[in-house]
Amino acid sequence: MGAVGMDTAQIHEVARNWSAVASTLVLILIRVSVVLAVGPLFSSRVFAARTKIVLALLMTWLLVPVAMAQQPPPVLGVASVLSELAVGGVYALTLGMLSEILLLAGQVAGVQFSFSLVNLLDPSSEIQTPLLADLFQMFGLWILFAAGLDRLLLDSVIRSLRMIPPGSLMLHPATLAHGLTPLLAGAFFAALQLTAPLLAVTVLVDISVALVGRLAPQLPVISLTIPLKTLLGLAVLLGTLALWPRYIQARFDDLLLTAERLLTQAARG
């Protein structure tokens, strides 16, 4: 009878362990899936859905031992699922500001280049976006992966498991809104900062053409405005591409730190 009782206790202990492992695996899978599905890097349609699924499952399997070191083990429920959705949503909303910065910068450049009516279908959002906005976002995506910033994002997700164990976050909407409002305000100025050389050159072209037209009204200088702005603007854009990696890396680091700060504040509060 003692042996039978011991075996029964061991069975219950194994069942509890497997239940904790399964709960941890599901919650981490939710957190990682939200980051991969909505975040600015892996959400692109360039990555096939099967690739994202395999990557999410692999990351989850590797992160389960890290999360299992946290005590007590998580309990799978509605509150814990909402907690993981909130953590992934913080990363997605915060880092998504980088895509908005590039989109706005491309729209500003498109207006200055007289390309504002040239629209393409954005494969990631399935909406019509200006040509240069798609080009800027494509440049940004290449730079993100070339600079290895995707590994920084994955490393931050690993650190979030230590800051916020699975299913333990209680995020209030006011905290999220208070943290994201400055980012929304700064996105416009960041886009202007990125397109400042283009704006300066195109404005100088407009002023120069206006002065020439004023001094020599008989010359058809108006017809030269758009070609000059386009050619000089593209030349300046090519010349400033060398500064893009440092700019995008700085913005990405700031946004990633903001996401971690919001999660830390929510965990403490």
Image (spheres, helix red, strand yellow):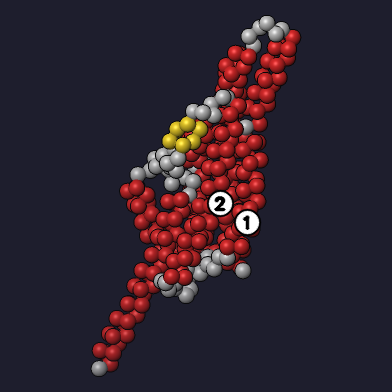
Relative side of 106 to 60, left or right: right
Q: Are marks 2 and 1 in contact (CB under 8 Å)?
A: yes
The residue nearer to you, when weighing 125 against 245, is 125
Q: Which residue occupies 39% across, 72% down?
A: 20
Q: Residue at x 56, y 24 (%)?
A: 114
Residue position for label 2: 94
Determine whether 148 is above or below 76 in the image.
above
Secondary element under disc 1, as helix, strand or loop, is helix
Disc 1 residue crowd, few under 14, some 14–19, many 20+, Cα 10 Å: some
Is 50 situated above or below 77? above
Between the residue at mark 2 and the residue at mark 1, the CA separation in whole angstroms equals: 9 Å
* Percent of width and height locating residue 157: 49, 56
| Residue 64, percent from left and from top | 41, 63
Which mark is first along the chain, 1 or 2? 2
Task: Answer with left or right where residue 56 lies relative to residue 242.
Answer: left
Q: Amino acid at mark 2?
A: Thr
Q: Position of residue 143 (x, y in %)?
A: 51, 37
Decide if residue 261 is on the left or right side of residue 145: right
Q: Residue shown at 49%/28% (left/top)?
A: 118
Q: Residue furthest top?
A: 218
Which amino acid lies under the numbered mark 1 shown in the image of this protein? Gly
42 w.r.t. 165: above or below: above
Residue furthest to the bottom: 1
Residue denoted by label 1: 179
Q: Residues within 10 Å of mark 2 (few under 14, many from 20)?
A: many
Q: Please give the name of the residue rendered at 40% of the width and 60% of the height, measured from the top-left corner.
A: 29
Identify the secondary structure beneath mark 2.
Answer: helix
